[in-house]
Image: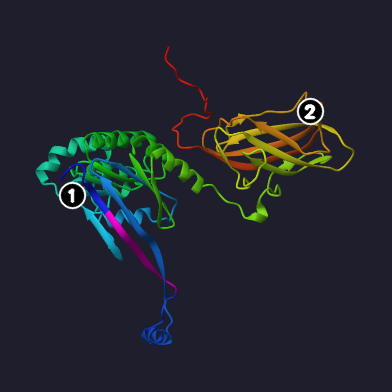
Amino acid sequence: MSSKEPIVVVKDLYKSFKLPHEQHSGIKQRIINIFKGVKGYETQRVLNDISFEIKKGEFFGIVGRNGCGKSTLLKILAGIYVPDKGIVQINGSLTPFIELGVGFNPELTGRENVFLNGALLGFSRSEMEAMYDAIVEFAELKKFMDQKLKNYSSGMQVRLAFSIAIRANTPILLIDEVLAVGDSEFQSKCYVEFRKMKEEGRTIIFVTHDMSAVERFCDRVLVLQSGKIKGIYSPGKAAAIYQRMNVSKQPDDKKDTLSNSRRWGTDDVRVDKVTICDGADCVGSTDNIVDQGEDLFIRIKLKNKSNPKKVVVGLAFKDIYGVNMSGPNSKGIPLDSSTDIEFKIPKLSFVPGMYVLTVAIFDMNTEVEYDHIEEAARFSVVNDGIEQYGKIALFGKWRQF
């Protein structure tokens, strides 16, 4: 096969499942329902008009939210599911890493399951004996190989299954999110294997929720949304689109409300509303999604229950793990509690992710706390797909001299 020819072709693919609505009490009721025209099931369209091609030697990612059809698509490529209609052309043999450990027998030992699983992959007894030590070493399970598999943790089973599966020398690999239960050290070892496979020119189709892995390994990425192709993008662009797709949308009646937040204070001055946006006019930004590198605006509407006061406003930005990103305050800058207050961050440097904002209102000496609101607002930062690490972007520039 020419290197220019696609190794995988999918054209006009559709797949649906029948979801039962009720249990029939017997044949009589089933017949009655048939005559009444009552269906006991609902047809769920999982994949709708899917078409794409994958080149030989390409590391091709498939991403999307849970339920978008990723795993169904992979199982069709593996031949596990049959599509309702459409063309699936695979130009070469493949190994699916979709449900690792399928074929394992929990009543057999780890050693016995190695040979059993190897036979399912088409290896002879002598070939498995030659591979056995390498399989056990990679899985880091030497002490457990004579124990029954039912005593293994799920992570141990995945390590053993993956260690066996990577011995299959096929040109195409289908990899689902099967490594999620493995620890970080084992995942790193697996990613080293992925890189080796890519260097060998093998074609890898990779379904994952790990955008860092997508950006490290993938050449192109297909983004699925509600069973349809949203597009095929570069890894960075796909990661940015995925971030936006996964931002939690609040119902309109719950936006900008502080009723569910933990709060305390004297209540002399009270925060009535907090708005976050990345445009000076805050138009079209009610979803609390902001772009990295853009100006960020925090707008605080106050409600003064007594005489107007000069106040100090304190903010705390934390990531979803509780790490304090920054804690600016207005001490030394008199602010009037009778007007709304705005805090502008030029060129927001937070890396993509979800962040939580705490707001507190003090007297000018910061001795009296009028209002303190934990998690007064949440917002998500997205970018244009540039790969980044750490907590903040430095926006530095490289040059040679």
In the figure, residue 312 lies in which quadrant? top right
Q: Residue at x 9, y 42 (%)?
A: 126
Residue 104 locus on image (x, y percent): 25, 52
Q: Examine the structure image and report whether residue 194 is included in the region drawn in magenta.
A: no
Relative to 283, 182 lies left or right: left
Label 2 residue SS: loop
The prevailing secondary structure element of the residues shown in magenta is strand
Q: Are marks 2 and 1 in contact (CB under 8 Å)?
A: no
Does the segment drawn in magenta span residue 18? yes
- Distance, label 2 to label 1, CA atoms, is 70 Å
Q: In this picture, which residue range is highlighted in magenta?
A: 10-21
User: Mark 1, residues whose alpha carbon is within 10 Å: few (<14), some, or many (≥20)?
Assistant: few
Viewer can see residue 183: no
Q: Amino acid at mark 2?
A: Thr
- State the count of labels: 2
Label ID, residue 366: 2
Q: Residue pushed farthest top? A: 401
Q: Amino acid at mark 1?
A: Ser
Query: Can you give x and y, in whole percent of width and height, for residue 228 in the image?
Result: 40, 56
Q: In this figure, which residue is indicated by the disc labeled 1?
A: 93
- Helix, strand or loop under label 1: loop
